[in-house]
Image (cartoon, rainbow, N blue to C red):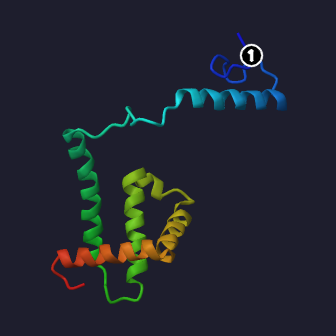
Amino acid sequence: MDPIDPMKAMPLQGLPLTDEVALTLKSKIKQAKMETTDTSGEAEDVSTLSPEGARLAKPQFEAFLEVAKEHVLNMDRDSETFLPDATQRMVSFAFERKFGEKFLNDPGYRQIEQKVTNFILNDPESRTMVENMLDLIHLESGQSA
């Protein structure tokens, strides 16, 4: 067994990691990737959801939107804090849907939620998207935007 062949060696199994060995490994890995990567054709391992899979994925998003709509429509749109509050609630719903309610109780969660909310509100493109979504929620419900 060639001790420097990354395809045969177990992760640094008995291999003294010197600069020379690391550079050789890096070179061999790079070469192996070049030899096995064909960028001229289309990807064969790309998968698309079957109709059944698409039906399973869609309800989760729809359920998120229903909860978000319900909470947003119950908020005071004329409040000065409407946009930050609505954005924070949608961020919270998204985290809960993705990671579960237990995640919301994590000691560092509020800081993460605040950073994401602030990013959305301070990024002009993200802020516009949220404003447009809130307007659509209100228009769809029959309330004026």
Left or right of 87? Residue 53 is: left
Q: Quadrant of residue 101?
A: bottom left
Residue type, numbered disc 1: Pro
Picture residue at 20% right of the left edge, 85% below the top? 144
Q: Quadrant of residue 139?
A: bottom left
Picture residue at 33% right of the left edge, 37% below the top? 47
Q: Position of residue 55 (x, y in %)?
A: 20, 45
Q: Position of residue 4 (x, y in %)?
A: 74, 20
Q: Position of residue 53 (x, y in %)?
A: 24, 40
Asked whether residue 145 appears in the rendered view, the answer is yes
The residue furthest top is 1
Compared to residue 134, the image places residue 8 above or below, namely: above
Residues 103 and 80: in front is: 80
Picture residue at 31% right of the left edge, 85% below the top? 77
Residues 78 and 14: in front is: 14
Few, some or many residues within 10 Å of mark 1 (<14, 14–19, 20+)? some
Total tally of numbered discs in the picture: 1
Picture residue at 15% right of the left edge, 80% below the top? 142
Q: Position of residue 110 (x, y in %)?
A: 52, 65
Left or right of 105? Residue 68 is: left
Residue position for label 1: 3
The residue furthest front is 40
Left or right of 84? Residue 74 is: left
Residues 133 and 97: in front is: 133
Quarter occupied by the N terminus: top right
**Label 1's element?**
loop
Q: Quadrant of residue 32?
A: top right
Quarter occupied by the C terminus: bottom left
Asked whether residue 18 appears in the rendered view, the answer is no
